[in-house]
Image (tube, rainbow, N blue to C red):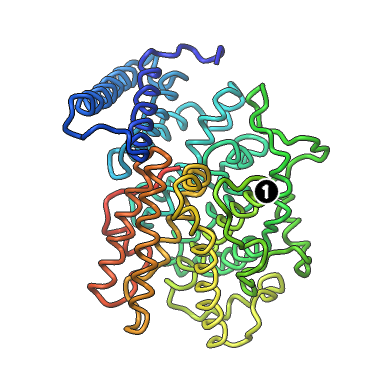
Amino acid sequence: MARIDHIPRIYISMLVTVATAHKAMQEAADGQLVQPTSTLARLRRQDIFSFRIRAIREVNQRLSLQDTQTSDSTLMCVLCLLMCTIQQSTYSDWRLHLEGAREIIKLRGGLKQIASENHYFRPLFVIYVVIDVLSATTTSTQHPKMPAAVSMALQYWEAAPNMFQANLAISAPCPEELFQSIILINYLRTIVHRPTMQARRWAGTRMVLDKIQSFNIPQWAARMQKFRGWKRSGESVEFEDDASPPRTLSSSSEWSSSQTSPADDQHEMSTMDTDSPTTTNPSPRSQGPDLWLDVGLLYHCGVLLYAIQTLLLDVDEDKSFLLGDSASARHWSSRDELGIQQEILQLHQATHETLLDTLRPVFSDHETAREVGKLVFFPAFMCGMGVSGCVLAADVEANIAKQSLVSTGLELMGQACGTLAPICAAEEVRTKWALEAREQKKVRWDDYFAARPDFTFGF
């Protein structure tokens, strides 16, 4: 951190704010927190509020001065304020801080320029990138900030070598290939209603579905056994005994396209047996390769659900375009429109069932929620959004049980991990279920978030 111009005291205060809120929530989960009306609880809330107000005032002052408005320390404070805000509420003014950071980054010449000047900024940038990309998944394509977000995200992999591998070092270890897929899905969502872009969208949809379905979970889990975190230089993450360079966007795409048929250990969601070893429910405190198999499986399912829902189920059009090239066609056995539609629905259902089954220990056991839940916020939220609020009469009882498991599970994750993000996510999915039950139909992803306040589920 020696190369950062100046670390203001308020930055430390914000870290204290985050830590205080985190500790208070975990104590509440452990049954140690005193009553909300007690003097200690009241003082805690006052301290958190006071730190936040001071932070906002100081950041605003720094932004108003020519010499400090785009400095390292100002950007660092804005990013920390963004994290602090999301931790305390996913419905608050987090987007103001996100867009403020985006503007500073643009004025500084972009992420690539700043990262080249100071390697020690990269961990903070990784958190910013993850928040930016994942918050776009819950943003309507009609939102005024969405075009800038997806445009900037398409340039992220140019910011630094192996940029997306650094996700593994924070509490959102989304595999590199799948994180790239989320970025592409966000972009493809924005061109759904642009007829002149139809050919590009179809080609992009085929590519992203092939990329997701070709993702090799066991191979990724084995590689994660060698993960050692950030290098001392802060330049990138490192793996133990890794002689070959980490995969980049181009090399991972080549790897995916070279898979002419699934290998023995290749995970294919369309034909998955949910009783296979890779989908076995992990026991509490699961360690070793099983943990990373589960994490890889959860992100695979979560990203695939997001793609199917937003790019296929929500778009009224003939789905035969999925057979447009051999790489995409190999994932579908049908060769007619009706058959493909049925396969899409079956794939969505099988993927959601696998996701829910794998999350069950996280949703049910406090220790597992504490140790694993913090790694899988995104898949957990996608699981909740995949539960319907409108089902056939014969399925009502089973669906209510699913809703209860997911909503209480998200709340458990929030308490165990010391953050309000999953708790707010539980409220969000309940709102979606209630809307579908009231209207007696499934709501489209984009329509739902267009009518909601700005929401992000944390990181």
Q: Residue at x 39, y 37 (%)?
A: 418
Residue positioned 54% across, 37% down in the render? 170
User: Which of these two is toward me, 240 or 333?
Assistant: 240
Q: Which residue is painted at 30% across and 19% down in the image?
A: 64
Place of residue 421 in the rendered image (x, y in percent of width and height, measured from the top left): 37, 44
Relative placement, left or right, of 230 versus 33 is right
Q: 383 or 394, which is in the foreground? A: 394
Q: Position of residue 89 (x, y in %)?
A: 30, 40
Q: Is residue 39 left or right of residue 2?
A: left
List the residue tagged with mark 1: 249
Q: Position of residue 81 (x, y in %)?
A: 36, 29
Identify the residue at the far right of this view. 243
Q: Position of residue 427 (x, y in %)?
A: 29, 54
Can you say whether 95 is above or below 209 in the image? above
Describe the element under mark 1 as helix, strand or loop: helix
The amino acid sitting under disc 1 is: Leu
| Other residues around mark 1 within 10 Å, as few (<14) / some (14–19) / many (≥20) | some
